């Protein structure tokens, strides 16, 4: 019994020391038309008397665009912006004070609390605010891993809308997307986030703060969509001024070449009348003279039997 009590106490202590997902991060799950989608919404803790006035959520617009979730808060969308990818649910952002939400600051340590696809327990991902994106209001967070000695793995799908908290537990941003881009001296694992302060300012129709111009810090060139069906932000094109200091090309004047007049020779056309030459008279062969040569008579001499006889000559006398 004492051993069981010790085991239960140890398990309780480990659970208390482990990093849990903030209760302000709530899981949402959508299903319809043969598709499924996961995401996270963040509870907006409004500052009020004795904690009253705690209501409303903020998330990514491409998450809440899936409709009413089967799992998660059923609050209706009040205001959303697909281009900046923020969405407020169950609260009018005009009632919010942007100053209640800290602005992102380069180098600040943060934690992302959210629910990747099929994860019901949630995940806490440490990171560092890296730099702002050329397209406001986005910022980049360099992701780290919670286990020592393991490279940052990032998250594939479902992390969109997750809550980005600073060391004090204040909500700074929500996750727009995540991906991997190689930058020397970093983990090359990133999350692109939407600051809550600037989302409130945009929803209230006020001009958001101008993005800082940090030129010494490399910006991740690409990111991976965290949820299906979301259209990425159009690429930023940089205008390049023409180089007027460049030396104009040197043109060399070339004298024209005159072609000499060709010489024509008159050719007398052939006459159309055909002259037929008389046939050539060939000499007639002369008749040949023939002379009859009489063969000389052969002397037939007796020869012994078996002796040589010229071919064609028979013995007249056989011995």
Image (cartoon, rainbow, N blue to C red):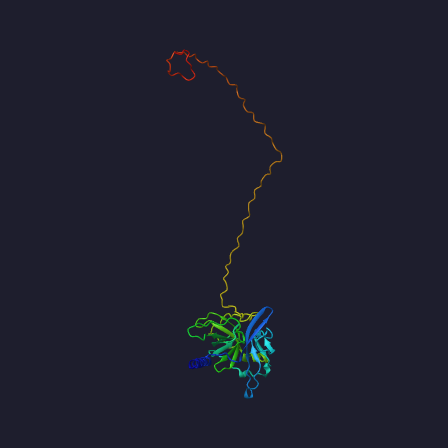
Please state which of residues 267 and 293 is positioned toward the viewer in this rendering. 293
Question: Residue 100 location in percent, x, y?
Answer: 53, 84
Q: Can you say which quadrant of the picture contains the C terminus?
A: top left
Please state which of residues 37 and 276 is positioned toward the viewer in this rendering. 37
Q: Can you say which quadrant of the picture contains the N terminus?
A: bottom left
Question: Residue 224 location in percent, x, y?
Answer: 52, 70
Vertical placement of residue 245 versus 206, above or below: above
- Quarter holding residue 237: bottom right
Res. 50 visible in picture: yes
Q: In the visual, does 15 lie left or right of 205?
A: left
Vertical placement of residue 271 versus 137, above or below: above
- Quarter holding residue 4: bottom left
Q: Residue furthest bottom?
A: 49
Please state which of residues 300 and 289 is positioned toward the viewer in this rendering. 300
Res. 230 visible in picture: no
Question: Residue 194 location in percent, x, y?
Answer: 53, 76
């Amino acid at each position: 019994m004492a051993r069981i009590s010790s085991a239960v106490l140890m398990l309780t202590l480990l659970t208390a020391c482990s990093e849990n997902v903030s209760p302000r991060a709530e899981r949402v799950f959508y299903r319809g038309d043969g598709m499924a989608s996961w995401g996270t919404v963040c509870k907006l803790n409004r500052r009020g008397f004795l904690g009253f006035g705690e209501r409303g959520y903020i998330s990514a617009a491409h998450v809440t665009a899936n409709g009413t979730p089967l799992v998660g808060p059923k609050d209706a969308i009040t205001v959303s912006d697909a281009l900046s990818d923020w969405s407020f649910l169950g609260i009018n952002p005009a009632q919010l004070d942007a100053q209640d939400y800290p602005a992102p600051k380069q180098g600040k340590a943060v934690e992302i609390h959210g629910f990747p696809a099929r994860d019901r327990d949630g995940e806490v991902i440490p990171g560092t605010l890296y730099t702002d994106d050329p397209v406001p209001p986005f910022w980049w967070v360099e992701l780290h891993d919670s286990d020592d000695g393991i490279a940052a793995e990032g998250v594939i799908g479902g992390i969109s809308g997750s809550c980005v908290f600073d060391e004090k537990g204040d909500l700074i941003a929500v996750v727009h997307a995540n991906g991997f881009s190689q930058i020397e001296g970093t983990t090359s694992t990133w999350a692109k986030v939407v600051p809550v302060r600037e989302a409130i300012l945009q929803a209230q129709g006020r001009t958001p703060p101008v993005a800082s111009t940090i030129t010494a810090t490399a910006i991740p060139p690409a990111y991976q969509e965290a949820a299906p069906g979301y259209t990425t932000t159009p690429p930023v094109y940089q205008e390049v001024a023409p180089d007027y200091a460049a030396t104009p090309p040197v043109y060399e004047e070339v004298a024209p070449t005159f072609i000499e007049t060709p010489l024509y020779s008159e050719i007398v056309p052939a006459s159309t009348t055909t002259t037929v030459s008389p046939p050539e008279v060939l000499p007639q062969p002369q008749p040949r003279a023939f002379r009859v040569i009489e063969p000389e008579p052969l002397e037939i001499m007796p020869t012994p039997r078996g002796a040589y006889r010229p071919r064609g000559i028979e013995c007249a006398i056989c011995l």
